Image (spheres, rainbow, N blue to C red):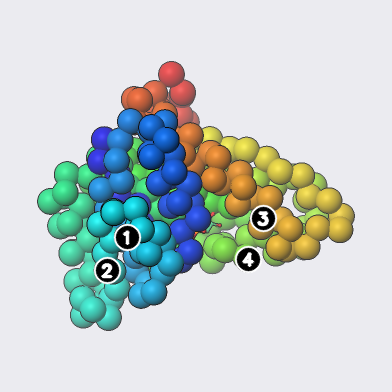
Amino acid sequence: IKIAVLISGGGTNLQSLIDAVEEGSIKGSIALVISDRKGAFGLTRAENHGIQAMLLDKKTYGGIEERDAALLQILQEQKIDLIVLAGYLAIVPQRIIAKYENRMINIHPSLIPSFCGSGYYGEKVHQEALNRGVKVTGATVHFVNEETDGGPIILQETVTIDFDDDLKDIQTKVLEIEHKILPQAVRLFAEGRLKVIGNRVKIL
Ligand code: GRF
């Protein structure tokens, strides 16, 4: 399968996918990395591995609508089979979500439905977990649907929070899990082992 990875930042999740593909554990290739932010280090990671890296920011394309139109066109032209949102902070428009139903996945740094929804991204997720005093948090990979962080859950894995953990400690523990379950989910997708039944996912 042909994979497109959408990023906005450092791209450590992208890196975990690049490594998995290069190890041969994913039956597919990353055809394209797209960032909505100039200077996202994830673009450099792609270039370092000979992967086409594109900056699709609203400034260059003259607005969000135009940018999203270009995004959809590129995804279709390149016959992308799976879109992975790996720290992509722009809103994916409904018309793209609709075209990629159960073919677009997202990694979120909490156990959905906790600490998710609009406004919950990056460090805020971990800050809220810290404030609430949860003893367990983790990461979730899910299919993207019209509801932010609301799509069918593919994989989740937990980490424990110790009383003395600070935000960075939690972020580090969760990121390690993200780098494990995102490639795992992409591998399962590539092997055709993810079956969506209602709002749940059965792993065949
Ligand atoms: C990760 O915490 C991920 O869960 C969230 O955004 C962050 C992306 O980190 N969606 P990176 O750019 O993959 O390092």
Q: At 43% across and 39% down in the image, what residue appears?
A: 20
Q: At 30% across and 46% down in the image, what residue appears?
A: 30
Q: Which mark is residue 47?
A: 1
Q: CA distance from mark 4 to mark 3?
A: 14 Å
- Name the residue type under label 1: Glu
Image height of 118 relative to 5, above or below: below
Under circle 3, the secondary element is helix
Under circle 2, the secondary element is loop
Q: Which mark is residue 124?
A: 4
Q: Quadrant of residue 81?
A: top left
Q: Nearer the viewer, mark 4 or mark 1?
A: 1
Label 4 CB less than 8 angstroms from ligand 1: no
Point out residue 144 in the picture as x, y percentages from the top left corner.
Answer: 39, 46
Q: Nearer the viewer, residue 65 or 180?
A: 180
Q: Which mark is residue 56?
A: 2
Residue carrying label 3: 172
* N-term-proximal mark, 3 vs 1: 1
